[in-house]
Amino acid sequence: MKNKMATTAATILMKAADLVGGDRANTHGDFWETHDNIARLWSAYLHNVKSADLTAHHVCNMLELMKVGRRKNGERNQDDYVDGAGYAGGAWQCVVHEDLWRQAEISNSEDTPTVEAGGLSQLREEL
């Protein structure tokens, strides 16, 4: 079993090295420059975040910014635009979820200290 896992790990690492130095380098441009662009976009985004607690909404926005950072370098790649739109849609879904969750928590704390039937548990299932 140990040999099989080592071979699998080695195979995965070799494939990753081929992609990073080949197809992905062409698609996304220079590795360092692309990641530097992403770091700058994330730093600007996080500059105005007032809490150390990141939400799912923040994560979706930052992943969308990752796609924006990739678009700046390399070849034009439709997947970066499609994925970016997907992250934007996911960010909106997170906003709706977080707002509903927050409202349910506020409502729950004002009415009773426990979650009533159909409260947070049902909301969690619906979203």
Image (cartoon, helix red, strand yellow):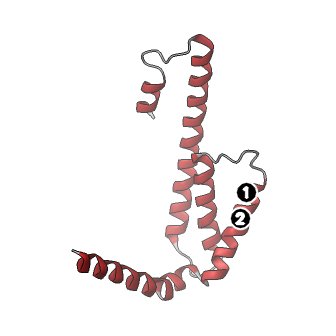
Whether residue 56 is situated above or below residue 27 in the rendered picture: above
Where residue 99 sits in the image (x, y, percent)?
A: 61, 32
Quarter of image, res 125? top left
Number of residues whose C-alpha sits closer than 10 Å to that of mark 1, classed few (under 14), some (14–19) or many (20 or more): some
| Residue that extends furthest to the top in the rendered view of this protein | 111
| Residue that extends furthest to the front in the rendered view of this protein | 2
Q: Residue at x 43, y 81 (%)?
A: 16
Q: Quadrant of the C terminus?
A: top left
Where is mark 2, residue-wise?
A: 41
Identify the element where label 1 is drawn. Answer: helix
User: From the viewer's perspective, is 125 left or right of 85?
Assistant: left
Whether residue 84 is situated above or below residue 98 in the rendered picture: below
Q: Nearer the viewer, residue 79 or 9?
A: 9
Quarter of image, res 112? top right
> Do the residues bearing badges 1 and 2 touch, measured as CB atoms within 8 Å?
yes
Q: Quadrant of the N terminus?
A: bottom left
Q: Residue at x 47, y 88 (%)?
A: 22
Where residue 42 sits in the image (x, y, percent)?
A: 69, 62
Where residue 4 sits in the image (x, y, percent)?
A: 24, 78
Whether residue 108 is situated above or below residue 13 in the rendered picture: above
Q: Residue at x 61, y 84 (%)?
A: 30
Q: Nearer the viewer, residue 1 or 80?
A: 1
Q: Amino acid at mark 1?
A: Tyr
Q: How many marks?
A: 2
Q: Amino acid at mark 2?
A: Leu
Q: Nearer the viewer, residue 60 or 6?
A: 6
Identify the element where label 2 is drawn. Answer: helix
Where is mark 1, residue-wise?
A: 45
User: From the viewer's perspective, is 55 left or right of 9?
Assistant: right
Number of residues whose C-alpha sits closer than 10 Å to that of mark 2, classed few (under 14), some (14–19) or many (20 or more): some
